[in-house]
Amino acid sequence: MKFGIPREIIDGENRVGLIPKTVKELVDQEHKVMVEAGAGTNAGFSDEEYREAGATIADSPEQVFAESDLVIKINTLSQNSATGKHEIDMLGEGTAVIGMLAPMNNHDVVQKLVEENVTAFSLEFLPRITRAQSMDVLSSMSTIAGYKAGLIAAQSLPKFFPLLMTAAGTIPPANALVIGAGVAGLQAIATCKRLGAKVAAFDTRPAVKEQVESLGARFVEMELPEDAETEGGYAKEMTEEFYQKELEAIGKRAQKSDVIITTALIFGKKAPILVTEDMLKTMSAGSVVVDLAGINGGNCEVGEYGKTVVEHGVTIHTPMNLPAELPYHASQMYSKNINTYLGGLFKEDSTDFNFEDEIVDDTCIVKDGEIRNEIVKNAVNEKGETA
């Protein structure tokens, strides 16, 4: 196979699809790898490192897209301002694409993939099974986002995070509340604890209480249903009555918090509002909210995706693409996930995709001019009906 690694073109994106170490492993397996010049520069990987790993360096994105069997992306395909062409239009006949294509937020891209008869794999749809854990790009990137959220909070808060005993008196630790104890939330808890804050966490899934407490944080208790998560381990959308009880529990804790980090997402749905404007009014001036759910509308009622705003004396960060701010390790983790995924993508001793494997089957969103993934198909059809 010939794998292509283009330079990512979305503003602020510094990651690269494969790092030189992974390229060498693929070349040693007798695959060919073509990397667009400068693709890894912002992540700390030079063209020379890729050459030494055995890759061919392409001068243009057109060459990568046209001459590869499989193009490995990070973000969805988009318009390339340098060439004036959409990345889909640069694909060669029969070239497939793999990446975090965000089909739920990019219906137009999905339609274009269908029209151009492109086979596309979107790694957000990896099944939640043990065998897929080492391929889980969402967990890898969420780890980075949670870590970075803790740093943003500490840097923005006009107080110390840790307990300090000084000649000028004793300074109590900051109080941090993390909402959502998935991968990002757990990493935010761990980071805030390392920085010395007193941390509490809230989640609708009772099963995560033990994980929260193992990190030294307090689990915010409320009456929780036993079926608060899906079979895949995601949080469920709850009833309106439960939602109001949830807001009440969070509100009581919010007024005691210097920092709130929100990470609550419902797969395929708009993010729930969990920090209301009324809650912000009860928080101390100078408090900080870091909302990691901005891409799906945000958990904070007041906030703008990709911006920092101040309301009622509270600073609300709604960052975009935090993993791109730690591109070296983000690329390293993503590259490892991709390499593991590639190990099962093809049938044995063949270049045909192994759709008998549930991992391959679940992640293929478009093939033969049709949307294969039912979740994506329903979302695209709903938008069409609404329009």
Image: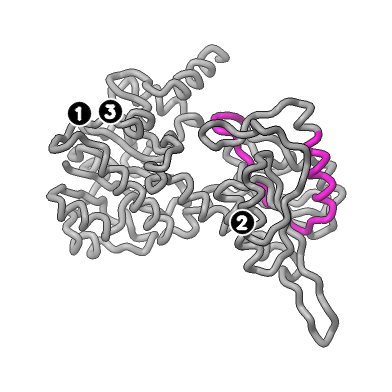
Tell me the tag on residue 6: none
Q: Position of residue 121 (x, y in %)?
A: 34, 33
Q: Are marks 2 and 1 in contact (CB under 8 Å)?
A: no
The three-letter code of the residue at mark 1 reads Glu
Q: Position of residue 233 (x, y in %)?
A: 54, 37
Horizontal relation, residue 244 to residue 125: left or right: right
Mark 2 is surrounded, within 10 Å at the Cα level, by few (under 14), some (14 to 19) or many (20 or more) other residues, namely many
Q: What residue is drawn where x is 24% and y is 47%?
A: 60
The magenta-colored residue range is 245-269
Question: If the image is split into quadrants, where does the C terminus sit?
Answer: top right
Horizontal relation, residue 201 to residue 22: left or right: right
Q: Earlier in the sequence, mark 3 or mark 1?
A: 1
Disc 3 secondary structure class: loop
Horizontal relation, residue 145 to residue 349: left or right: right
Q: Foreground residue, 371 or 106? A: 371
The three-letter code of the residue at mark 2 reads Ala
Kindly identify which residue carries mark 1. 93
Mark 3 is surrounded, within 10 Å at the Cα level, by few (under 14), some (14 to 19) or many (20 or more) other residues, namely some
Tell me the tag on residue 188: 2
Q: Foreground residue, 215 or 13? A: 215
Q: Nearer the viewer, mark 2 or mark 3?
A: 3
Q: Foreground residue, 88 or 289? A: 289
Q: Nearer the viewer, mark 3 or mark 1?
A: 3
Q: Are marks 2 and 3 in contact (CB under 8 Å)?
A: no
Kindly identify which residue carries mark 3. 355
Vertical order, 288 against 267 (above or below): below
